[in-house]
Image (spheres, helix red, strand yellow):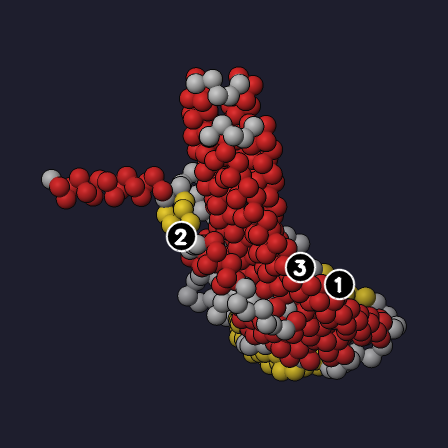
Amino acid sequence: MRKLTFALVLFASANLYGQEFSLFQAQEYALKNRETIENARLDLESAEKQVIETRAMGLPQISSEMNFQNFLNIPVQVVDGAFIGQPGTLVSFRAGTDYNVNAGVTLNQLIFDGSYIVGLQVSRFYTEFVASSIDKSKQDVLADVTKSYEMAMISEQNKEFVDTLVNLSEDLLSKQKELYDLGLITQEQLDQTEYSLLQAKANKLAAKVAYENALTMLKMTMAYPIEEPISLSEDLNALMGEQMKDLSGSIENNIQLDLLRKQKELSIYDLKNTKMAYLPRLAGFANHQYNAFSNEFSFFDSDQEYFSQTVWGLRLSIPIFSSGERWAKTQKAQIAVKQNELSIQELERGLQAQEIQIKNNLKQARSNLTLKEKNIELARKIYNNSLTKAQLGRENSILVTQKYNQLIAAQTEYVNAMMDVLNTKVQLDELYNKLIRE
């Protein structure tokens, strides 16, 4: 019975607090469940099937064909009468049978086609391009989850901070009521303290809503069931320290740069393909078929005669003149390659500038966080001293409210400073492609 009760308590606790996630676990969950990742995987699977499809174009192709013809009017043939001793006249006659049937098998084999060779190469390379696109989707998802997780942690800490202030305000009001009953403070001072408590409760409600909204955003970015509870296992200070350990990296690892370079490779393959249009195309074929002719529908009779026919051959197609079409396509492909090269140069320069800006912003954000941390410690100390004096009746309630507002302002600035540091670090990780862990 005790074991059953203990199990029920554990089950109830799990339902109350929901599944607990560290930042890494939240990221892994998102990678397994986000629809954008699954769509990207399907794109890769489709690209792999495209390789098979392209390869099959150069392998033997076998097809079968059957035809049945019923001539309602047998075609008329016209010949010179000299064939039958009547020169200078035209003789007409009907040639053929009422029914014709034929069935055969054809084999086609591509022997040489430059476009096919390039198509094989580009189809294999395209799978690499799609794989890089998957990495880009993963990076976007990981950035979203990381920002949402960190926002939820900061909101949770802010909620706990405001809860503490409400408790302090309630304690102060209780003690000031005692002082009021003793005639040591005025009604105005008591009302001011109650006003401060109501303001603190309003801040508590706002902090609670902000925390719940942050959790909802985290669930959405993780593709976690919105209606299910969730809890966070990370310690905010430890996470911030861990996030700031390694700031190294290189823009050469940037995913956008990698994608643009691969796009240039695709343009080069397109240029090769247009040049291949100048080369001949050679294909072989073989056909074997049976034909039957009759004036009655007797093709299933045992005495129906079928005539076989077998042929094989080669088809050589030689491009000679296209009125400048092939030349124009080649020039366009060369222009596309040049445009990709210019885009790469522009992106590299932009990434270099972005790297400097993000590092400067991160340095400023960390310095600002240190100042805001000291500022909130000082504001908390001032507020606590003011509370102590007010509890003894030595501090005016209006001054306590002013110092409370000062503390709230300092806390808001501290929260914003933490978000600036963490968001800027995520930007740096995106720049260096460090969000994706091997």
Q: Residue at x 25, y 43 (%)?
A: 10
User: Is residue 193 visible from the viewing direction of this image?
Assistant: yes
Amino acid at dot 1: Ser
- Closest to the observer: 213 or 304? 213
Instruction: Please say if 198 is above or below 17.
Output: above
Chain-order first, disc 2 or disc 1: 1
Q: Pointers 3 and 2 in contact (CB under 8 A)? A: no
Q: Judge depth for marks 3 and 1 and give the one in front.
A: 3
Q: Pointers 3 and 1 in contact (CB under 8 A)? A: no
User: Is residue 82 visible from the viewing direction of this image?
Assistant: no
Q: CA distance from mark 2 to mark 1?
A: 98 Å
- Closest to the observer: 22 or 310? 22
Percent position of residue 278, x then y:
78, 80
Q: Judge depth for marks 2 and 1 and give the one in front.
A: 2
Disc 1 on helix, strand or loop?
A: strand
Chain-order first, disc 3 or disc 1: 1
The 10 Å Cα crowd at callout 3, few under 14, some 14 to 19, many 20 or more, is some
Q: Which mark is residue 386?
A: none
Mark 1 = which residue? 92
Q: Which mark is residue 233?
A: 2
The 10 Å Cα crowd at callout 1, few under 14, some 14 to 19, many 20 or more, is few
Percent position of residue 321, x then y:
85, 77
Mark 3 = which residue? 364
